[in-house]
Amino acid sequence: MKSNPFVSSILLLFSVLGAASVLAEDCKNCGVVESVKVVKDEGGNSALGMIGGGVVGGILGNQIGGGSGKTLATVAGAAGGAYAGNEIAKGSGKYKVWKVKVDMDHGKSHAFELKKKPDLAAGDRVSIEDGKPVRVYK
């Protein structure tokens, strides 16, 4: 029996399309990048900075004056030191974070915070590997 080239082409097309849909179904950890945004994390209040600054400020304030003036200087030094210590600790915690939102093929969205600038843009096809989005090259 002679094979029909038209029918063979149609069968080949359906087999290729079928293979593509199987590949897409096999990638349960794939999706598309919705957005990539850089944000600055200012750090939070630092109890250690406040306590350390308060102790140092109190000790320095205690060295000034005598009587009730000494008490006032100690309290003022502790308060000022706590404030300064907290500000220093907050300033040392500043860093950039890249927030990447991915719309997964299975319908859910995932958000990732990355410490390094990713080589990703909105619309990129990604796979989640080791908890991070990685571009899928076609």
Image (spheres, rainbow, N blue to C red):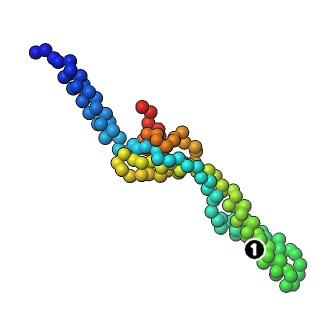
* Placement of 97 over or under 75, stated as above or below: above
- Return the residue nearer the eye: 28 or 48: 28
The image quadrant that residue 82 belongs to is bottom right
Which residue has dot 1 on it? 79
Apparent side of residue 102 relative to residue 115 in the rendered image (left or right): left
Q: Residues within 10 Å of mark 1 (few under 14, many from 20)?
A: many
The amino acid type found where label 1 is placed reads: Ala
Which residue, as the protein is rendered here, is positioned at the far left?
1
Q: Residue at x 62, y 50 (%)?
A: 96
- Return the residue nearer the eye: 98 or 124: 124
Q: Quadrant of the N terminus?
A: top left
* Placement of 55 over or under 25, stated as above or below: below
- Return the residue nearer the eye: 49 or 3: 3
Residue 92 position in % (x across, y down): 69, 56
Q: Residue at x 46, y 40 (%)?
A: 124
- Return the residue nearer the eye: 51 or 35: 35
Which residue, as the protein is rendered here, is positioned at the far bottom?
68
Residue 40 position in % (x across, y down): 62, 54
Apparent side of residue 119 relative to residue 49 in the rendered image (left or right): left
Apparent side of residue 7 relative to residue 53 in the rendered image (left or right): left
Residue 18 position in % (x across, y down): 26, 33
Q: How many marks on residues?
A: 1
Q: Quadrant of the C terminus?
A: top left
Q: Label 1: state its secondary structure.
A: helix
Which residue, as the protein is rendered here, is positioned at the far front?
6
Q: Residue at x 35, y 44 (%)?
A: 28
* Placement of 1 over or under 129, stated as above or below: above
Q: Is residue 83 visible in the rendered structure shown here?
A: yes
Residue 17 position in % (x across, y down): 28, 32
Q: Is residue 53 visible in the rendered structure shown here?
A: no
